[in-house]
Image (tube, rainbow, N blue to C red):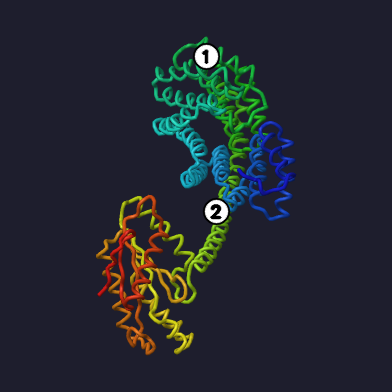
Amino acid sequence: MDFSEYNEVVRAWMNEVLRNRGVNAELTLKYCADIEQYGTKLDDAKLLGFACYYSGETYYVLNDVANLFRYITRAITYLDQSEQWEMVARAYNVMAITSLNRGNAPIAMDYYLTGLSYCKKYHLYQEENMIHLNLGNLYLSNGQYSEAQKYFERVQRYVKEEKESEDYYSLMSCISVNLGKCYLLGERSERAQEYVDYIDRECWAQLQKPEQLDVLCFKTHFYHAVGRISMRDECIAKIHEQVDVDMAVMDVFDDFYELCQLLLEIGNEDAFWDILNILEELTKNAKIINLQRRIISLKIKYYRRHHDSAGYLQATGLYYELTEVMERENQYMIANMLAVRSSLEQSNEKRREIEQVNATLQEKSETDPLTHLANRFRLNSYSEQAFERALCGGKPFAVEILDIDYFKEYNDNYGHQAGDECIVMIADELKKMQDGRIFCARYGGDEFVIIYEGMTEKEVFAEAENLRERILARKLEHAYSKALPIVTISQGICVDIPAEETRSWDFLHAADNMLYQVKKQSRNNIALGRLEESEIRMGY
């Protein structure tokens, strides 16, 4: 991100945000608030998008879902307006994770796919792989193991090419865990073993505590599935030691929920309640009703297994109450999604209006106001592009310059308005020629230039001759011409195949010399030749 246009104080705030994010939430939110206040005064979408995104990201780490939604939804609109596409994709990813944890998979899928559309449009490979990883988890959690595997393997191929990145081992561990789960749940434990071995051999020493807990949860399930009970219990003991409330609940919930299910199944009640209580505290602090409800479902299973009627009734009553709250939350999420879509549509409409205004201004700056042909400015850029196409393709390129015979006499005797009308008449005939191969422009005064692309000498001459005849057929009176008593034109054309040492200007200069020869020898005529030719072909 380039923020060099801002003053030193604002840049310092931004650097502090980037330095403290994920490390010091209090400082991150403080500097985000400073940036947001300053951006509000300036009505600066770029600053507001930055501040709102990193505020939302910080509330994600703090498990404060209400503030996360409030800031991320605002961020998306500002980021879209200021075209900060990487952060737009990340914002949709965060919204998807949050929606999924709130129990609304369809909305989560919509956010993921919207984020992916930005990734594909703007070639955001890192963000695309982050979303693919999460989509793989979504398919995995819904029992679609082969589809999940495709997403994980796609990300794996990308990460292997980026071995120098700081989070290489973290990503490879995460991918390996997920691929191991796919094989384990698909009853291919021998392939799952390969990923256990890979993590132990290549990644473990490089991992931080949250990543190690993720690996330990996976290994617990793996060792249970293959009957290595002592190794399973060793993993459980390590998890039991390390688990605490200093974790982002949305990052760890699924792993620990599945672990609690296993602990309940094998009768390890001490570890079950210790981990469940920590998970419950995290979800209550985050105020995520769906996760709280899932914890209650574990308690219901426990009470039913132990025939604890009082605990069972209390838990089922709370589950019902949370279900009602969750229905209201779902309505809030849908309303929130619609609000984001509406805001973005308004933003896109404004962008389309601006683009239309800019296109109109651009067209005006490149168009001759009298004839509505391209002007000299547009001619310069077009001729360079056309010349390069011909040079690269080894195809013919031709430039014609023409003017109206004895135009000064016409203007002096018929008046400037009639002179303008005469120029417009020539322009109208030129417009009839324009197609994908022929481009016409007003060069200035009564002079016009035509560019011919990929046409043979014979084809170019035929087009030029046809133009001359059409102008003669208009029979516009010019009693003061020394050529004919009607308006006529003289034309000079250079046609050749460009070489590396030539430029489009060389063709224009040669065409101008040929026009001079026409006017010197016989007006109402055409002279055509090549760049280095001494012989010039005259029309008749």
Q: Which residue is mark 1?
A: 232
Q: Which residue is mark 2?
A: 341
User: Quarter of the image holding residue 13?
Assistant: top right
> Residue 322 location in percent, x, y?
61, 39
User: Looking at the picture, does residue 506 appear above or below residue 287?
Assistant: below
At x 45% / y 73%, what residue is drawn?
Answer: 372
> Residue 132 location in percent, x, y?
47, 36
User: Looking at the picture, does residue 503 appear above or below residue 302?
Assistant: below
Q: Is residue 204 left or right of residue 63?
A: left
User: Quarter of the image holding residue 294?
Assistant: top right
At x 66% / y 37%, what residue is drawn?
Answer: 18
Assign the N terminus to one quadrant of the image: top right
Is label 1 in contact with label 2 (beta carbons under 8 Å)?
no
**Inter-mark Cα distance, 1 to 2:** 47 Å
User: Looking at the picture, does residue 479 appear above or below residue 450?
Assistant: below
First reached walking from the N terminus: tag 1 or tag 2: 1
The kind of secondary structure element at disc 2 is helix
Q: Nearer the viewer, residue 509 or 391?
A: 509
Graded by Cα atoms within 10 Å as few (under 14), some (14 to 19) or many (20 or more), the crowding at tag 2 reads: some
Assign the C terminus to one quadrant of the image: bottom left
Graded by Cα atoms within 10 Å as few (under 14), some (14 to 19) or many (20 or more), the crowding at tag 1 reads: many
Mark 2 belongs to which amino acid? Arg
> Residue 366 location in percent, x, y?
49, 66
Mark 1 belongs to which amino acid? Arg
At x 65% / y 31%, what residue is drawn?
Answer: 282
The reply to whether residue 436 is in sight is no
> Residue 105 location in percent, x, y?
50, 41
The numbered dot on residue 529 is none
The reply to whether residue 15 is in sight is yes
